[in-house]
Amino acid sequence: MVGKASLCTARFSAAVAVLATAGLLAACAVGPNFRVPAPPEISRYTQELLERQTSSTDAPNGVAQIFLQGRDIPQEWWRLFKSRELNSLIERSLQVNPNLQAAMFALGATQESVYAQEGHFFPFVQANFIPTRQRSSESLSPVTSSLTAFTFNLYTAQVLVSYTVDIWGLNRRTVESLQAQADLQRFEVEAAYLTLTSNVVVAAITEASLRGQIDATNELISINTKMLDITRRQLEAGFVNRSDVAAQEAALAQVKATLPPLRKALAQTRDLLAALSGGYPSQGPRETFKLEMLRLPVDLPVSLPSQLIEQRPDVRVAEQMLHAASAQIGIATANRLPSFTINANGGYVSTILANLFNPANQFWLLGANVTQTVFQGGVLFHQLRGAKATYDQAVWAYRAAVIGAVQNVADVLRALQNDADALRAARDFERAAKISFDLARQRLETGNANVLLLLTAQATYLQAEIQVVQARAARLSDTAALFQALGGGWWNRPEAPAAPKILDVGTGWATTLIDRHY
């Protein structure tokens, strides 16, 4: 009996599935079919032709950088700075940075939404068993045909199948919209990945710059301290007066006053690096950075503008927002059209449990339902108009993202050209200031001092040294900004970022999601 019942149910479900599949194949999806917008019709980033290379100087990190049009970006571009400490810090940050991990879990959630919606392509099937004890009215005939008792047991075992035929593509457009949102989140992950790596590189360069400025300031403090000792001795010998000593004391105090802001900025940068690598400020990064530890990349890839829109995560996010908005127009259109549903119900009913699956107790029902909204106060009409307005908004947002991306690259290219010129000018300034300062110091040591000239020379030399350090750091930072502006090379990774990790509450240890049991 049970075997025959199972066979009957299987045939019944198969018949419904065939009807549903036929309806799906015959259906069409209303609304616009999304097309990726064409790339911008430009061949270069700047109005004038980009110079093939920057200027150079004899300062550290003063080599000329060469722009290579159309060259692809390496997947781990930060390795071009040739710093093992930087590589180690970035690898650790990619594993435990909270923002990146949160973005990856958000991606998992949106993808599961797609899978859940795809389930509506199949019939909705329920099986139930309903045992009841009931009494019928004595003034009526007994409900059952086999019993004369008015109180009896009734057992029902049945399978219910319902399927809404996707004639207008409502479900397909819904899946399309959700998939676009999942793709959007995937590019949000890439944006978080790129932002994290770029922020770590820039923070490391900032730390190196601050350490260089602190070293230069300490060197000048040492020099000014020695000069103050000489000035005091010359005061005792009668070569200078007390105002000269006071001026030198003021100059030393002024140089010392520049140290606390630099130390403050350095401490805050270290806190930032700790946070980026998933730690607390008290834990701090193990690595320290100096400008001498970072090599300036010489060969700089420059993607074509037509490639940029495929490489920039923010542009791809805007593209998927446009895609999702396009699908929403189809959803709003389909909601205004009739819906077609197939319903089926089959099973067995009996007053005796042992005899439930007797063929004589079998029943079934097959029906259809067509539903059309006649009046709803203009809700569906305005929802369609709202979907179209949202699409137009997404069109302009996409255009803004493309323009912003091209502008970003153009700004960085101009910055790199000017950074090289700034370093060369700062190096010439430092060289001339050093000569002037050395001559003024020699006069002081020989007793033929012009204190005003000396103070001016040492202030100028301090400014020149700081400018060289800042110019070196600017070249490194803007080089990192170029790789970020061009998209960071995420498309060259063999696989997506590492599997998401969650924190095991109570232990604090990170475990992969697949290791957890729910």
Image: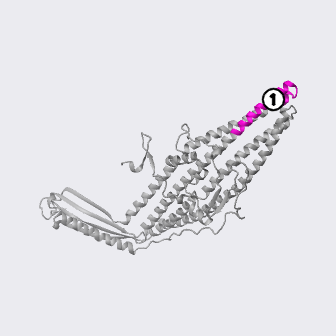
In the image, is 515 to the left or to the right of 96?
Answer: left
Which corner quadrant of the image does residue 460 belong to? top right
State the scheme by which the image is colored. one colour
The stretch in magenta equals: 215-244
Residue position for label 1: 230
The amino acid type found where label 1 is placed reads: Ile
Which corner quadrant of the image does residue 433 belong to? top right
Residue at 58% in and 63% down: 309
Q: Does 237 appear in magenta?
A: yes
Above or below 202: residue 160: below
> In terms of depth relative to the viewer, which is nearer, 304 or 517?
304
Residue 155 at x, y percent in the picture:
19, 59
Residue 12 at x, y percent in the picture:
26, 69
Residue 316 at x, y percent in the picture:
55, 61
Label 1 CA crowd tier, 10 Å (few <14, some 14–19, many 20+): some
> In terms of depth relative to the viewer, which is nearer, 343 or 445?
445
